[in-house]
Image (cartoon, rainbow, N blue to C red):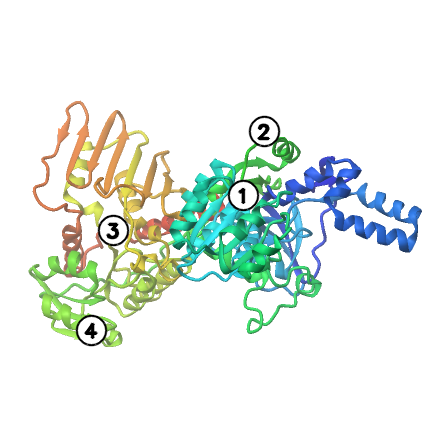
Amino acid sequence: MKQVVQNYKSGELAVLDVPVPGCKPGGVLVRSAYSLISTGTELMKVSEAGMSMLGKARSRPDQVAKVMQSVATNGVPATYRKVMGKLDSYTPLGYSLCGVVEQVGAGIDEVKVGDLVACAGNEHALHAELNWVPKNLYVPVPDGLAPRHAAFGTVGSIAMQGVRQGGPQLGEVALVIGLGLIGQLVVQLLAASGVRVVGVDPDPVRCELAGRLGAAACGDPASAAVEAAVAELTGGLGVDQVYLAAGGGSNQPVELAARLCRDRGRVVDIGKCRLDLPWNAYYEKELDVRFSRSYGPGRYDPEYELQGRDYPIGYVRWTERRNLACFLDLLARGSVDVEPLISHVADFDDAVETYRRLKDGDLKAVGVLFRYPRPEGEAAKAAAPAVAVPAVKVRRSPARAANASVRLAFVGAGNYATSMLLPHLAQRDGVELSTVVTTTALSAANAQRKFGFAEATTDLDAVLGDTSIDAVFVVTRHSSHAELTRRALLAGKAVFVEKPLALTEEELAGVLAAVEESGNDRLQVGFNRRFAPLLREARTRFGARTGPAHLRYLVNAGRLDHTSWYLQQGTEGSRFAGEGGHFIDTASWLLDADPVSVYAVASPGDEDLQVVLRYPDGSTAAISYVTSGPAGFPKETLDLVADGKALRLDDFVRATVYDRKRWVSSRLPKARDKGQNAELAAFVRAVRTGGPMPVPLESLVATTAATLAVRTGLAGGAPVALERAR
């Protein structure tokens, strides 16, 4: 394998071929996907290595002291041989990476081969293709977090430990001196903690970046702007805490900290800067000077790092491993954003040239990543991960047709059910609203009063056991859809479930297992857009096609209120997982096929997505799902081009087909009709007559699998094949 090394005596940097490390007990062998260059710590080492022997001695007085002690103990000749031997050896670089577990050592059971992990340690998370990493220095990467972002885990833990040492509280004001990689992360962590931050750095580009990432004000340490901002934010009292994230030989950061800190404030040293404390200034304010030791408790303790002995959480809440996991969680939830910190991504083979450019100043950067090649024989597999599209296996039982009217039960009576479904059903002839089931009695009573349900209850089992009920509507939170659908199918009911059908492949498999067990495939998912009258007319006028088509679908989803349960990704899945099936189903219906692959990329925090679907005949559909658009812009616009023709849909208000003669619909005079009424009519008709469901089950499964594949694609950064089971 290859590894980046440096000779400290000559300053030489090289990518060497070295043996693959063994997979020892108590750890895992990890194949690197991305590793992060610390533009502070590592570049300092690289610069020191290029100095003369005198320069090296001046820069490391601590090491000179050790040499002098060795001379006193062992004599000059022995010490000289020892020092020269150490200097004239290759040493590793790197300490923060993300990779894939390739082998699991004895005693490890919480990860398996193929899992994505973030790793830490200047002896275990090196710039190398393979690393052995002990248990307490790696953590699994949360679902959906991109590997290039997870590679920031170690530096994020360093920043997090520094913030913990400062003990920030809501409403406080902090000063961050030095806006390099660590400083930018400290700014974001403080802002996420409810602290107002003033940043200090002589580089205006870094100041501007910190402002975008949450700092209230930023400026050059020599300017009056910083002092003015501190005075304004604190009423002239001074900041509550100062974080020293700067390096170099200047004592200016320490002096500035004393000048701008309040009485009995806190000063936390994270970086490696000069610390000649001005005694009077620190004494008169009785400043509390604290040091932050790397990633957190456990660092430099061989029993913790090498032997895997954890500290009890009751005594040590935040160890280095817990800090690492916490930082990755913040990244996955979008509370911290590292994408703007990535100045450059270099191929691992170009490591030496990348270091040279950084050292010489040709490459101005905050964060630089090495991207590693995939091993031969695994490239094709890694480049095209797959999500299974389960086969629908069912010996269908005869469909039960309703006698006179269709008796419906609703499980859930939230906003969507009461605004978009029940108003249509309550007015429809031949429909009887039998029972509404909710978890709270009052919401059931409200739905009963407004829409005329015969009964209101919180007892789901009673409804599923009622043989007079023909169909069940599942309109609850996303996390419960699959299980409620499964139970209703097993009870022999026709089921209308709002999207999504399932949030995981396991949930989808469970629904299909219920179909197979019961012989009941009477299922409809609320993909209503294919039923929209305007879109159906436009499709008819577009006509048949002979060649591949290309579809573009822009969804201006907008931002959610911070109280929305849609944001509870840990339990309810991502926002796209919840409603993305709408747009995939619409594209597949227009293209008259199911997709065969999915490629997805996202903005930081996965709020804005670009999803590209490929179809068997070469057709493609690009879905842009954005939350950052203006509120006044149309929510949904769609373009379809094929065979010299084009179809355009403008937010379900107007449609246009361009052919030899252009057809333009009249503008709808009323509210947009996105097809809910027609979809409900088709579902009720199928239940009443015993005819086929409005959408084939195979199509519902394919759309759900494609939606799930988006998450897989975001995690792996590669197209995902949709493999149909046979």
Q: Earlier in the sequence, mark 2 or mark 1?
A: 1
Q: Which image quadrant for residue 42?
A: top right
Q: Is residue 428 left or right of residue 218?
A: left
Q: Are marks 2 and 4 in contact (CB under 8 Å)?
A: no
Q: Which residue is drawn at 54% across and 43% down?
A: 180
Secondary element type, mark 1: loop
Pick the residue in front: 365 or 265: 265
What's the residue type where badge 4 is placed? Thr
Which numbered disc, 2 or 1, marks the residue closer to the eye? Answer: 1
Residue 98 can be seen in this image: no
Q: Mark 4 points at which residue?
A: 467
Determine whether the residue tagged by mark 2 lies in a helix, strand or loop. loop
Q: Between label 1 and label 4, give the one nearer the viewer.
A: 1
Name the mark nearer the viewer: 2 or 3: 2
Q: Is residue 396 above or below residue 217?
A: below
Q: Which residue lies furthest to the top in this view?
A: 660
Instruction: Examine the rendered structure and indicate whether residue 223 appears above or below residue 256.
Output: above
* Number of the front mark, 4 or 3: 3
Task: Please tell me how crowded label 4 is: few (under 14), some (14-19), or many (20+) other residues with Cα within 10 Å.
Answer: few
Question: Mark 1: which amino acid?
Answer: Gly
Most foreground residue, 501 or 282? 282
Is residue 484 at all visible to an observer of this figure?
A: yes
- Picture mark count: 4
Q: What residue type is labelled 3?
A: Phe
Instruction: First in sequence, mark 4 or 3: give its number.
Output: 4
* Residue at mark 2: 362
Q: Which secondary structure lies at badge 4?
A: loop
First in residue order: circle 1 vs circle 4: 1
Circle on res. 329 = none
User: Which image quadrant is residue 508 in?
Assistant: bottom left
| Number of the label disc, if any, that sits on residue 180 | 1
Disc 3 crowd, CA 10 A, few/some/many (<14, 14-19, 20+): many
